[in-house]
Amino acid sequence: MVFTLDTDLPPALAPLAWLIGRWEGAGVVGYPTIESKQFGQEIVCSHDGRPFLEWHSHTWLLDEDGQKVRPLATELGFWRPLEAQPDGTNVEFLLAHPTGFVEMYAGKAEPAKVEVRTDGVMRSPAAKEYTAAHRLYGLVNSNLMWVMDMAAMGQPLQSHVSAELKRVE
């Protein structure tokens, strides 16, 4: 079943509607505990008429020529709009990772901008130490730009990843 933005999008999703679609692009990942590298990314953000968005992100390592080397990270999750809270919070972002993490973010969605911070991070006993994150997504010149700061491996919250993706059909 195909849903159109005009008639089938629940009104509560309006601040997140710009995320809907398939996005592809590239970015940089780095951290004090890892060497900086280029990566490719595909995000598919969709809805089925209910008041949430589905989120699927896949990344892969790129070589110096921009060719795929190997898979990196995968995220599966949901964007959930909320009734605005006294602190301005109006969205949750729930993510699961095959590396043993489950993240719950809360923050503020505006037209063309979403900013969220972890409200909770759970990890399996075998997962690496990871305690907090901050993400910012924006629609800039029709591209999806995003950045993530992370606190992990004994390091304080600091820059970890950034990317620019284009909407594709």
Image: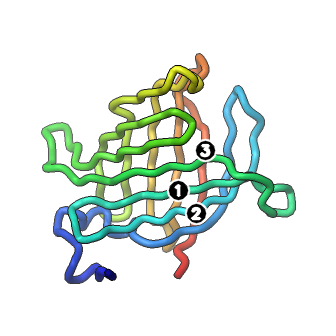
Give the residue displayed 58% in from the left and 56% down from the top.
Answer: 58
- Report whether 147 appears left or right of 105: right
Residue type marked 2: Glu
Front one among 6 and 157 = 6
Q: Earlier in the sequence, mark 2 or mark 3?
A: 2
Residue type marked 1: Ser
Alpha-carbon distance for marks 1 and 3?
Answer: 14 Å
Give the residue displayed 42% in from the left and 58% down from the top.
Answer: 55
Q: Which residue is mark 1?
A: 57
Quick one: SS at disc 1? Answer: strand
Q: Quadrant of residue 42?
A: bottom right
Q: Quadrant of the N terminus?
A: bottom left
Give the residue displayed 52% in from the left and 62% down from the top.
Answer: 43
Q: Report the residue that reaches farthest toward the top.
A: 154
| Mark linked to residue 35 | none
Report the mark closest to the observer, 2 or 3. Answer: 2
Do callouts 1 and 2 mark residues in contact (Cβ within 8 Å)?
Answer: yes
Report the mark closest to the observer, 1 or 3. Answer: 1
- Report whether 21 appears left or right of 119: right
Which x, y percent locates residue 110?
A: 29, 58
Which x, y percent locates residue 128?
A: 59, 25
Which x, y percent locates residue 148?
A: 52, 43
| Mark linked to residue 161 | 3
Quick one: SS at disc 2? Answer: strand
Give the residue displayed 50% in from the left and 71% down from the top.
Answer: 22
Quick one: SS at disc 3? Answer: strand
